[in-house]
Image (cartoon, helix red, strand yellow):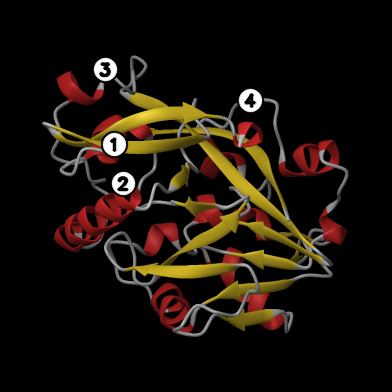
Amino acid sequence: MKLHTIDTGFFKLDGGAMFGVVPKSIWYKTNPSDENNLCPWAMRCLLVEDGNQLILIDTGIGNKQDQKFLSHYYLHGDATLDKSLKAKGFSRDDITYVFLTHLHFDHCGGAIEWNNDKTSFIPAFKNAQFWSNERHWKWATEPNKREKASFLKENIIPIKESGQLNFVNENGDNFKNFEVIFMDGHTDHQMLPKIKYKDKTIIFTADLLPSVGHIPLPYVMGYDTRPLITLEEKEKFLNQAVAENYILFLEHDSVNECCTLKMTEKGIRLDNTFQLSEI
């Protein structure tokens, strides 16, 4: 098995929204913002090369949305999904599975593209099977009013219409060399891949832990639909991460790809940061 970081560029989100009840005077130390209170965030995906399977975990925001939509998120950086895949020797047509941790637009937008005539939307990975789970799919296709703006129909419905949609079972054991951890605080039934790699355990943290700035327990995003559940899930997860020496792959941290944690007098805190390629 080989793991590859796939960078798809950066976007900006309001720092206050990203850190919830934590005041700016504190979160600014790890995630400085611009004059509009916006912080840069990565949309970092993971490519799992495992025998004849090529699994892409999340896809970034994509490029099919109109300029009005994209202008709210200040996309920047030179990296794209296609460029990053090419740099690793692959193309979208090589992908066999697209695993979507959840269906918010910054995680699944790149799964769908315009057709050549820009008359309809089609899967951007024509040879891949797409993986969500039944509970989250229902949550995303029948969205609550608070979360509706994050679930764009054009990112979701074409996956089912193509016949390429699959659901991970509740045991999360559909894949040979990684498990699935389900989390319900950020959005219903978010999926975190747990991958055995070089005698280590790597967790793709998605939106449970967006960045190293979110490690302290109360640092929970204002975007989370059930923040108290996030607190419970996060506390359990952080304790496991320390006890079992997990390596955390960070999807949204604008600087750090991976990190480990340690227990301190103040609770669980950052231990080391490093690139995936250093493992």
Q: Are marks 4 and 2 in contact (CB under 8 Å)?
A: no
Q: Position of residue 34 (x, y in %)?
A: 37, 16
- Nearer to us of marks 1 and 4 is 1
Q: In 3D space, how far apart are the residues under numbered discs 4 and 3 (Cα atoms)? A: 23 Å
Q: Which amino acid is tagged 1?
A: Lys
Q: Kindly identify which numbered label has been placed on residue 29.
A: 3
Element type where label 1 sits in the image = strand
Seen in the picture, residue 43 relative to 174 is either above or below; the reply is above
- Nearer to us of marks 1 and 3 is 1
- Nearer to us of marks 2 and 3 is 2
Q: Which residue is mark 2?
A: 242
* Residue farthest along the front direction in this orientation: 199
- Dot 1 surroundings within 10 Å: few (below 14), some, or many (20 or more)? some
Ranked by sequence position, the earlier of labels 4 and 2 is 4
Seen in the picture, residue 95 relative to 45 is either above or below; the reply is below
Q: Are marks 1 and 2 in contact (CB under 8 Å)?
A: yes
Q: Which amino acid is tagged 2?
A: Val
Q: In 3D space, how far apart are the residues under numbered discs 4 and 2 (Cα atoms)? A: 33 Å
Q: Which residue is mark 1?
A: 262
Q: Which amino acid is tagged 3?
A: Lys
Seen in the picture, residue 92 relative to 18 is either above or below; the reply is below
Ranked by sequence position, the earlier of labels 1 and 2 is 2
Of residues 218 and 137, the one nearer the viewer is: 218
Q: In 3D space, how far apart are the residues under numbered discs 1 and 4 (Cα atoms)? A: 32 Å
**Residue 261 in view in this figure:** yes
Quadrant, the C terminus = top right
Element type where label 3 sits in the image = loop
Q: Which residue is mark 4?
A: 77
